[in-house]
Amino acid sequence: MSDRPTPLYRGPAQVPPAETPGLRGLLTIAVAIVAIAGLYLGRSVLIPLTLAMLLSFLLDPVINLMRRVHLGRVPSVLLAMLLAFLVILALGGVIGTQVAGLAEDLPRYAATIQHKVDTVQQAVLSRITGFTNRLVHNPALVDGAANTQPGTAPAEPSPPATPSAEAPKPIPVEVHQPDHSVIQVAQRIATSVAAPLSTVAIVLTISIFMLLQREDLRDRMIRLFGSSDLHRTTVAINDAGERLSRYLLSQLAVNTAFGAIIGTGLAFIGIPSPVMWGILAGLLRFVPYIGAPISSLMPLALAAAIDPGWSRLLWTAALYLGSELTMGNVVEPLLYSHSTGLSPFAVVLAATFWTSLWGPIGLILSTPLTLCLVVLGRHVARLEFLDVLLGDTPALTPVESFYQRMLAGDPDEAHDQAEVLLKEQPLSSYYDDVVLKGLRLAAADAERGSLTPDHLERIKLCIQSLIEDLDDHADRRPPLGAREEAATIASGAEQGVPPGRHSAGAPAPSERDFPPAWRGEAPVLCIAGRGLLDEAVSAMLAQLLEKQGLASRVVPHAATTRATIGALDVNGVAMVCISCLELFGTPSHLRYLLRRLRQRLSADVPVLVGLWPAGEEILHDDRLRAAVGADYYTSSLQVAVETCQAVARKASVEAQAPSEVAAEVAAH
């Protein structure tokens, strides 16, 4: 016979390999490549169309406001577009005027910057020269640096060659461009202005038709993409529209305030053309993360050019830095009711992707376009990967994240996650809703052969470390009805011991609140099942009991076998709690375990069996419960603790009753 021990979990000997990509996956990749190529090749058409769509989302709240004052759709759309055109024209005129005025003073600014550069160079060269002179006049360094052979004299430097007096002098040559005629100047100006004006005209025209035909376009999109599921398509369109409108309006308000602060501050500092720099700061701040730093480069350069000193440069840098920190960390969190739905990584990735396709315009449009993709990923099953990659929702549930950290052997990250979750729920709820479900995943993986006993042992050690780290957290009960209570079936319900529930923040009972039988060193005996992770569950239950004033002791399953049950110390035990993650098919081992315990325990000691989570048939089958013979069954650690407290309170009432009767007899 082999001495090799029988493995605890049986399953397939090998985990099946991952599936190779099929035809559908290859077609998806091909479609993605074609779509990216189409975005790049059709940018001359798609950019005005995208700008028009975003402008229509931005103007839609304004049009709705006008319609509330009984203006028709057509007058409201035309008036809103006229206002948008006037704003764009005014911004362009201000920028052009201030650029022309700034160009006249550029030679003077260049001379100031050159003077500062020369000053810095002279300071650096003087330091280098002084350091070199100290090295040369140091005898030790000179002797060490001398590398000439003895007996040889250094060669005398040759005199510089003087130019010959008979050499002919070069003749200077000047090239003069012919003066441009008025027609040529006008043609050059018209050529440079025609492209932006034509783009603006196209954007405004498309926006007008989008706003006038909004319902018709929406119906056509539904008919084209989602006629088979009107509900999901309508929800997706409404979600995208609300998110885009909220994002654009919020960004417009924040960036306008940012530009106004910058322009006013630069005017007080004395930077030329402050209005232009304020407008550019507000526009460039639509670019995430890098827009504000880019907008500060030219004002910083001007601050260095107009001031012989450095004070204006420092004040300008402080203005941009303070304004950006205030807007990003104070104003935006207060203004935005919730996130736009994009992760920081998605914002950076989108900026890189759309800039490579559409240039600077793509950089400004990257966030709104990516937001549309995330909304599609949330409502279209085949595009769900977009929401996973780009959205701000966690990629893993708390249970999956906990289990992943246990598999990686990193209890520190699990502790960090627990600290975040424990700010909103008590310790018992965290154990029930996260840890127990994560252990259930581990037990399922072990049963099908994905985890070896060594892996389970590592998970067990990580959980024990986590339990120790969380020992300083109080277990505050949630309010009544805040969480759905797990199924609890008490075979001793006729005894009048329903599990209780404490209100939020209720203080834990002290030891003197319990009868003498419950005041021992360990009145509650927490016995682990035969699974490798059951002992960790018993440790969590014991910790929760300790926080509620009930001392407990954890006993491994090995101490309850037929060979070792006789040595089990049961003195002072008032209740027994058995923890099992799973029954391994049948509850027969539980029945035999309870028989052995009944032989060692007093007849009045109740037994509670915890099966985590609520999925075992025994929790709902009276016949199986009667066959096992436990007094209480539960699938929640919180309910297990409450059951122990209820049993202790009942014992306290029964212990006080005889003393009250004796006192009444003595009084008579």
Image (tube, rainbow, N blue to C red):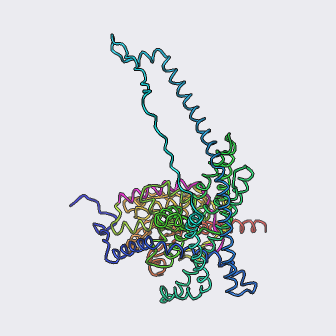
Dominant SS in magenta: helix
**Horizontal and vertical percent for residue 275?**
70, 59
**Horizontal and vertical percent for residue 556?**
43, 59
Q: Pick out the residue farthest to the left.
A: 1
Q: Which residues are magenta?
A: 453-482
Task: Say which quadrant the C terminus sits in.
Answer: bottom right
Task: Say which quadrant the N terminus sits in.
Answer: bottom left
Residue 92 image-quadrant placement: bottom right
Residue 22 image-quadrant placement: bottom left
Image: 255 above or below 198: above
Q: Is residue 475 magenta?
A: yes
Q: Is residue 394 left or right of residue 314?
A: left
Q: Pick out the residue farthest to the top.
A: 151
Q: Pick out the residue farthest to the right.
A: 668
Q: Residue at x 46, y 37 (%)?
A: 170
Q: Is residue 588 magenta?
A: no
Tell me, yes or no, if residue 633 can be seen here. no
